[in-house]
Amino acid sequence: MKKKKTQAGYSLSVIMTVLVVGIVLAAFAAGFLVFVAVYNSSMRNNTITASEQAVVQVTNTVSDYTKNMRELMELIQGYYRDSPDSRNTAIDTLILTRNDTVLVTCYDETGTLLESWSGRHGIKEQVFKNLSLNLNVAAEDGKMTISKPHVETLLADYYPWVVSIQQPMTAADGSRNLVVMDIRFSQIADYVDEVGIGQHGYCFIMDGEGDMVYHPQQQLIFSGLKEERLELLQNSPDGYLEYSDVIYTIKTMADSGWRVVGVSYVDELITRRVRNVAVLLLGLLLLVLFTAVCSSLVFSRMISKPVKNLIKAMGEFEGNASDFTYHPVEGSREIGALSQSFGHMVVRIQQLMEKVREEEITLRKAELRALQAQINPHFLYNTLDSIGWMCEEERTREAVEMVNALAKLFRISISRGHEIISVEKELEHARSYLKIEKFRYKEQFSYSFDVDEECLKYYCNKITLQPIIENAIYHGLDRMVDEGEIRISVKSRENNLIFMVEDNGIGMTKEQCREILEGTSGDKTGIGIRNVNNRIKIYFGEEYGIRIDSELDEGTKVIITMPKIGEGGYEER
């Protein structure tokens, strides 16, 4: 039996694409030839006119900007003749009320900063390079000068793009200093960015020395990806200059010496007369567009639209797999089969995710029970040992008080099986423990509590403070000669509760602190702290837990961070 031969050749979509592209290329080739023949003579005049209009607009706007800067400097010059108090008040008010004024500074003849007015921003203590001051220009001209745009380097943590105006001024006391005012350049930059000549034409500003002042594509200029013919433009008079397929329109500003240059491309400014040629090509273009649109609609409905719907469903499933509900995509037989397979895969993955989630919950419950089991025997052993020691010493009354405190402590520890208890009960639990230990250690240490009242209504893990306090007593205060001190505080910080246990004991090294939290010390030191830290992370996440700050012979501070949880705010799992 012979096998069926697969049909070779191009698909219908490829044939249609080649046909449409061929027709479009032929139509535009003919239209381009007609266009070049008819409109080549008018191309140059249209380009020059559009460029001149854009350059005049930019020149007027920049002139108004520089005029405004000079008026502000004249106003400051008037303030500068007043008394120091009056001058400071007037200039500070000017900076706070005008968004364009960034900074005013005053220097002596050597460039030493004497005074500054910066509004809400502070001056740097150390300035690497002062871009606002140019002593050479000020000394040479002896009049008001305008710098090139630059980044503000004098303000702390604030770096706007500014232009500096500097002018010698005489103060009320007769001293002659140099006053510099930094004004935002962003308004002019934004305006120049928005000016367009055709689709790709633009304007930029240069100075009389041939240096760039501002270019809308400044990043490309500085990175070397774009280049302007500045030497050619510097030696050219005002007017227009045609170079290759580019027309430069130049106009010099009398007040600042800056030159506004418009860059326009000849091929872009011919759209008004293209309509005459478009009439000749309209019939052919309508036929091509009609064929292309019909073909696109048919293929989109048959293939593209169902595929896009399936891709969209896959993206939604990837973003939220657990809550995703799949609706089958209708289309051709192949699309239907693919849609059905994807639906089966979605159901299977969701079943596996639910199974993994249940296993994680079971594992976390087992971890919590194991951690709690480690803490309770450890604490009970130490407490009963203290009570036994008191009975041996025939301190019956104190032993009874310790037993009562122990009973109260374990009543809170049991908490009807709940892992989460109120902060108030947790503090009561800590006080009971401290009372027991203070009996045992014969008043060798004192303790105090500093608790924000608003924190008492929140909830936390039970038996959180007791292991920390126990570690402070046994390993921090036990070997001290002087009286020890333990301070417990609970504070509110945004959405978190901050528990802090401090002692003035012997302290630890950073390596010992790390070993306690990571359990790498090789002994049982800090087992209670590690267990508390693990319980907090299991319940609330890795961003919560314990941090230890300690210095040898100074003491130890244990900081516990938990989220604020109200009654019923955390579901027991």
Image: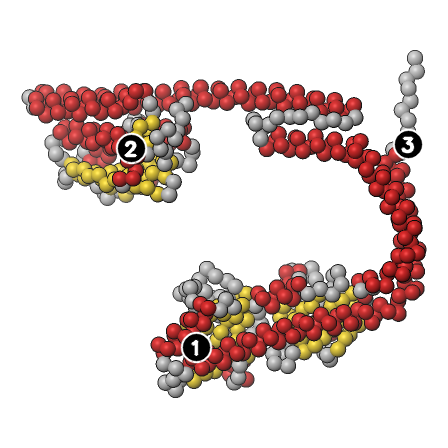
- In the image, what residue type sits under mark 2? Val
The total number of labels drawn is 3
Judge whether residue 408 can be spotted in this image: yes
Q: Residue at x 29, y 28 (%)?
A: 463
Q: Is residue 422 above or below residue 199?
A: above
In the rendered image, which quarter is residue 317 located in? top right
**In this view of the protein, can residue 227 be seen by the observer?**
no
Does residue 333 sit above or below 293 in this rendering? above
Mark 3 vs mark 2, foreground winner is 2
Residue 107, disc: 1
User: Residue 419: horizontal and vertical position, in percent?
Assistant: 34, 25
| 157 with respect to 265 (left or right) | left
Q: Please provide percent x and percent y for residue 287.
A: 90, 46
Q: Position of residue 24 (x, y in %)?
A: 89, 48
Amino acid tagged 3: Gly
Marked residue nearer the N-terminal end (3 or 1): 3
Question: Compared to 29, does 261 lie above or below?
Answer: below
The mark found on residue 423 in the picture is: 2
Q: Of the numbered discs in the image, which one, if any, rests on residue 18?
A: none
Q: Which residue is mark 3?
A: 9
Residue 558 sits in quarter: top left
Please rate how many residues cluster around mark 2, counting C-alpha atoms within 10 Å: few if below 14, some from 14 to 19, many from 20: many
- Secondary element under disc 3, as helix, strand or loop, is loop
